[in-house]
Image: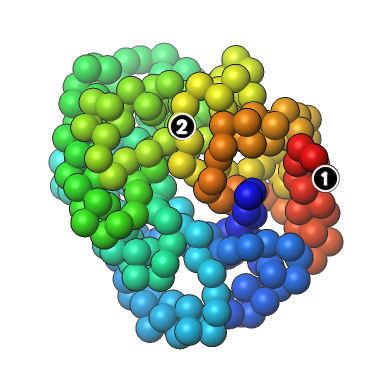
Amino acid sequence: MIRLACQEQLLPGTSLAERWDAGRAMGFDAVELRGAGGHGLRARLPELRAARAQGVVVSGVCPEMTHFIGDFDPARRRDAADNLRSQLSVVAELGGLGVITPAAWGLWSNRLPPFVDPPRTPAQDREVLAELLAGLGEHAVREGVTLWVEPLNRYEDHMVNTVAQAAALVVAAGGRGLGVMLDTYHANIEERELASAVRSVALGHVHLSDSNRLAPGRGHVDFAAVLDALVATGYGGYLAMECRLDGDPSEILPRAVRHVRDRLPR
């Protein structure tokens, strides 16, 4: 069964419980949390525990940090890993399925001028990422959740851009407690064909946004083909909206839910 989630910041309301009520009325099945750096998610535990007691369903966590495990600075890499470790523990307590991490975001682009090589080789990138992912994966196993590796487009990350690259990195890290996710916005840029990419890897999580980063239905992604492929693979995770809103969320989000659900195979 396909389940829809929405990132918390997109939903109207001042508290997580209010946002959950709004999202449920729109047709969402869960809320995806944002995990700020500086152990911001752990600091929210009293609020999050109260929200869970009120019936809020959490699908997972998308980190909102300034640096990630592929950073060039060792101290920033360690800090990113520490934050992810605490987010994995928090999401496990809340009954969610896992936490997302890219290799990096906005760290380097060798696809934009001045076209110079990054300070590490691709082999060194893989070594750094695999080492940290292996330890984080073991922590995820202990907590009973998953850490999903997210490929980003070439302009936002130079290391992991496709689901095939993410899957190879998971294997290099030993695989335990780790999985691969797909974001339809990034995949629309990097994958040769979206449905084929969906079928090529056992996905653990999916982010939905259209080709222009707006809500599904506001661009040209063929969501019917994507959903057909997901259902054909027996996908059992959440589809979480991570998008920009170009209007009133009370109008845009229900329309996006209908756009997705209307394209599910019958």
Drawn side of residue 80 relative to residue 227, left or right: left
Amino acid type, mark 2: Ala
Left or right, 25 with reference to 123: right
- Residue 132: name its quadrant: top left
Residue under the image location 50 percent in, 59 percent down: 59
| Label 1 environment density (alpha carbons within 10 Å; few <14, some 14–19, many ≥20) | few
Q: Earlier in the sequence, mark 2 or mark 1?
A: 2
- For label 1, the residue is 262
Q: Is residue 118 above or below residue 5?
A: above
Q: Name above or below for residue 8 compared with residue 145.
A: below
Question: Residue placed at 37% from the left, 27% from the top?
Answer: 167
Label 1 residue SS: loop
Position of residue 7 measured from the top left corner of the image (x, y, whole percent): 58, 59
Q: How is the image coloured?
A: rainbow
| Three-letter amino acid code at the position of disc 1 | Asp
**Residue 40 shows in this picture:** no
Residue 201: % across, % down: 47, 26
Q: Are marks 2 and 1 in contact (CB under 8 Å)?
A: no
Whole-number angstrom distance, CA of label 2 to CA of label 1: 24 Å
Give above or below for 199 relative to 150.
above
Where the C terminus falls, by quadrant? top right
Q: Position of residue 154 (x, y in %)?
A: 48, 24
Where is mark 2, residue-wise? 202
Q: Percent position (x, y) of residue 253? A: 76, 58
Total marks placed: 2
Q: Give the residue displayed 23% in from the left and 26% down from the top.
A: 172
Q: In terms of image quadrants, where is residue 225?
A: top right
SS at mark 2? loop
Q: Is residue 130 found left or right of 224 in the rendered image?
A: left
Q: Residue at x 43, y 62 (%)?
A: 96
